[in-house]
Image (cartoon, grey):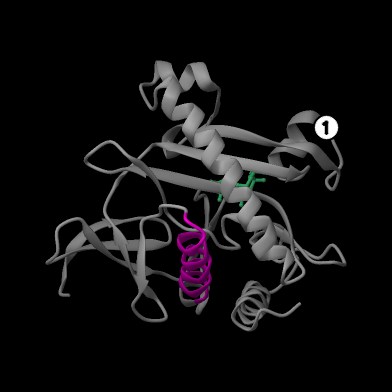
């Protein structure tokens, strides 16, 4: 397969077309952002860690029967993805109180939710990705009732699989963000990435094994992500 011209450059990824219809060549970059891009840093090695972690997780989801955009890993920093039209919505699932959920409801981080909660955010940097409900999703023509129901159910299915994948290496899946895309035929499939950049993962001692080490300046991101990747590769706690 031949790499084509740059199609889009995001905060942490570059997307290139290829000589094959509907296949994108994706390169993970070293930029870390927080506060919706207001804080930016180059962290050497971050791109290759996220690409490798995301690839391993998507391979596991594909094998478990989830339809995803992931085709294959090409190199430490690159992967091939099916080209889809990204639905402009961040789908967040929470198993444990943390982050903006703790702030919004004035709660301490750490309480386990009796039922996982699915939330939607409108993907719009200029508006700081506002929290939206099902009716806003319909008003904004982002998705229909049927699609909303599918997105919620699919996110819960993916949560069950991810919880197991992370718990096998001793990590609690606190919360995570997913993005979905539409194929030309309208089918909705899982897209984007799943990594410590997009998931909160706590170890048995309650240490943060995710981007919160960068957001909160409480540790070395490369050391933490390397630890996560090594555990995933070796399947050990
Ligand atoms: N998240 C993400 N991208 C975003 C916002 C959130 O990947 O633009 C992830 C984040 O890593 C966490 C989950 O979604 O795993 C919930 O994040 P939260 O709403 O608590 O926001 P934060 O505290 O990160 O601002």
Q: Is residue 28 above or below residue 152?
A: below
Where's the C terminus, which quadrant?
A: bottom right
User: Viewer-proximal residue, 169 or 193?
Assistant: 169
Query: Which one is nearer the viewer's eye here, 118 or 49?
Result: 118
Q: Residue at x 52, y 75 (%)?
A: 49
Residue at 84% in and 62% down: 206
Q: Which residues are magenta?
A: 49-65
Q: Looking at the picture, does residue 181 appear above or below residue 226?
A: above
Which image quadrant: the N terminus? bottom left
Total marks placed:
1
Task: Choose top left, top right, bottom left or bottom right for residue 163.
Answer: bottom right
Position of residue 214 measured from the top left corner of the image (x, y, whole percent): 65, 63
Name the residue carrying label 1: 106
115 within the magenta span: no
Q: Taking the image as drawn, is residue 47 in sight?
A: yes
Left or right: 42 as drawn, with respect to 10: right
Q: Residues within 10 Å of mark 1 (few under 14, many from 20)?
A: few
For residue 70, above or below residue 96: below
Q: Main secondary structure of the magenta part?
A: helix
Q: Residue furthest left?
A: 19
Please state if 83 lies on the left or on the right of 19 as rendered: right
Q: Position of residue 180 (x, y in %)?
A: 42, 44
> In the image, what residue occupies the spot 42% across and 56% down?
11
- When asked about the image quadrant of residue 13, the answer is bottom left
* Dot 1: element: loop
Kindly tell me whether residue 129 is visible in this rendering. Answer: no
Image coordinates for residue 9, horizontal then vertical, percent: 31, 57
**Quadrant position of residue 26:** bottom left
């Amino acid at each position: 397969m031949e790499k084509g011209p740059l199609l889009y450059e995001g905060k942490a990824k570059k997307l290139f077309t290829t000589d094959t219809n509907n296949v994108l060549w994706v390169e993970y970059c070293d930029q870390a952002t927080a506060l919706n891009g207001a804080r930016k840093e180059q962290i050497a090695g971050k791109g290759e860690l996220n690409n490798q972690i995301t690839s391993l997780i998507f391979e596991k989801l594909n094998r478990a029967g989830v339809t995803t955009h992931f085709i294959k890993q090409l190199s430490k920093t690159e992967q091939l993805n099916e080209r889809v039209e990204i639905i402009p919505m961040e789908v967040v699932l929470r198993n444990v109180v943390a982050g903006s959920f703790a702030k919004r409801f004035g709660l301490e981080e750490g309480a386990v939710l009796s039922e996982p909660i699915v939330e939607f955010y409108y993907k719009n940097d200029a508006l700081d990705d506002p929290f939206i409900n099902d009716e806003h999703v319909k008003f904004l023509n982002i998705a229909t009732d049927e699609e909303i129901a599918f997105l919620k159910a699919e996110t819960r299915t993916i949560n069950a699989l991810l919880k197991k994948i992370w718990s096998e290496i001793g990590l609690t899946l606190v919360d995570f963000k997913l993005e979905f895309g539409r194929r030309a035929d309208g089918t909705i499939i899982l897209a984007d990435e799943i990594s410590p950049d997009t998931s909160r993962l706590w170890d048995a001692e309650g240490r943060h094994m995710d981007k919160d080490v960068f957001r909160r300046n409480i540790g070395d991101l490369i050391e933490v992500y390397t630890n996560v990747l090594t555990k995933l590769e070796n399947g050990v706690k």
